[in-house]
Image (spheres, helix red, strand yellow):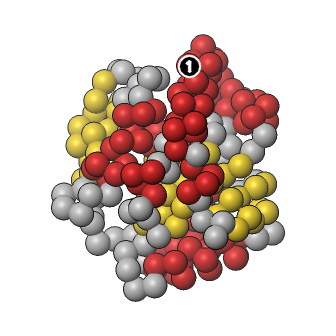
């Protein structure tokens, strides 16, 4: 059953629910939402708080995985094919400045992990996670925040990226696969 939480007030509840979701198993958190929603900020804060309670926790930002501006679908596939696979998990990194792969980044299959980014929650990856979080925010505000953050480097790509997000959302409806829908600011 999907629950909605309003941040910042519900932060302690969010952290408690994530910790409880593991129940003796490896904790796997998927955090999805549109560009500019605040997923990275939320994931970093969650990572910090989980490390304080659970010890070493891994954080993978799909920004480091997308193979360029047309790579949302490819990174989404890598979540279940490579990042969360039980043996030798990891992913090929992406160097945005050089627009090329930047080498393999291995992960520990035993340690808790948070995977954040648009495309993190899909029909295939959802089954591999204990906690699936959809971060909801108004599209206009997301665009304002994303372009304010990344400026002219992102501006010419906004429509291209938004079309990939829309395709991912249509195919997977990640909010329907989520355990938690988070609204507000991290």
Mark 1: give few (<14), some (14-19) or many (20+) Cα within 10 Å. few
Q: Nearer the viewer, residue 77 or 37?
A: 77
> In this rendering, would 175 be left or right of 55?
right
> In this rendering, would 66 be left or right of 83?
right
Which part of the image, by quadrant, shows the N terminus? Answer: bottom right
Where residue 14 sits, quadrant-wise, is: bottom right
Write the residue at 68% across / 43% down. Answer: 37
Disc 1 on helix, strand or loop? Answer: helix
Where residue 3 sits, quadrant-wise, is: bottom right
Q: Nearer the viewer, residue 152 or 13?
A: 13
- Mark 1 sits on what residue? 160
Write the residue at 56% across / 57% down. Answer: 177
Q: Is residue 147 visible?
A: yes
As drawn, which residue projects farthest toward the left?
A: 87
Write the residue at 39% across / 38% down. Answer: 75
Eyeballing the image, is 177 above or below 38? below
Write the residue at 66% across / 66% down. Answer: 2
As drawn, which residue projects farthest toward the bottom?
A: 24
Q: Nearer the viewer, residue 124 or 112?
A: 124
- Residue 13's spot in the image, x, y percent? 70, 76
Q: Is residue 52 visible?
A: no
Eyeballing the image, is 52 above or below 174? below
Which part of the image, by quadrant, shows the C terminus? Answer: bottom right
Eyeballing the image, is 146 above or below 2? above
Where residue 167 sits, quadrant-wise, is: top right
- Residue 175's spot in the image, x, y percent? 63, 52
Eyeballing the image, is 59 above or below 153? below
- Residue 4's spot in the image, x, y percent? 74, 64
Q: Nearer the viewer, residue 7 or 130?
A: 130
């Amino acid at each position: 059953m999907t629950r909605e939480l309003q941040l910042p007030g519900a932060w302690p509840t969010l952290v408690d629910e994530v910790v409880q979701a593991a129940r003796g198993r490896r904790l796997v958190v998927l955090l999805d939402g549109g560009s500019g929603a605040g997923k990275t900020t939320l994931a970093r804060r969650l990572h910090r708080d989980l490390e304080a309670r659970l010890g070493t926790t891994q954080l993978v930002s799909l920004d480091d995985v997308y193979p360029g501006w047309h790579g949302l679908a490819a990174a989404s596939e890598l979540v279940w094919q490579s990042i969360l696979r039980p043996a030798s998990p990891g992913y090929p990194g992406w160097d945005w400045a050089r627009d090329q792969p930047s080498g393999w980044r291995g992960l520990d299959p035993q340690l808790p992990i948070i995977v954040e980014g648009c495309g993190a929650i899909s029909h295939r990856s959802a089954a591999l996670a204990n906690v699936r979080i959809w971060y909801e925010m108004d599209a206009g505000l997301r665009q304002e925040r994303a372009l304010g953050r990344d400026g002219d480097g992102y501006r010419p790509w906004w429509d291209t990226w938004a079309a990939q997000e829309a395709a991912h959302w249509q195919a997977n409806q990640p909010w329907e696969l989520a355990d938690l829908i988070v609204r507000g600011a991290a």
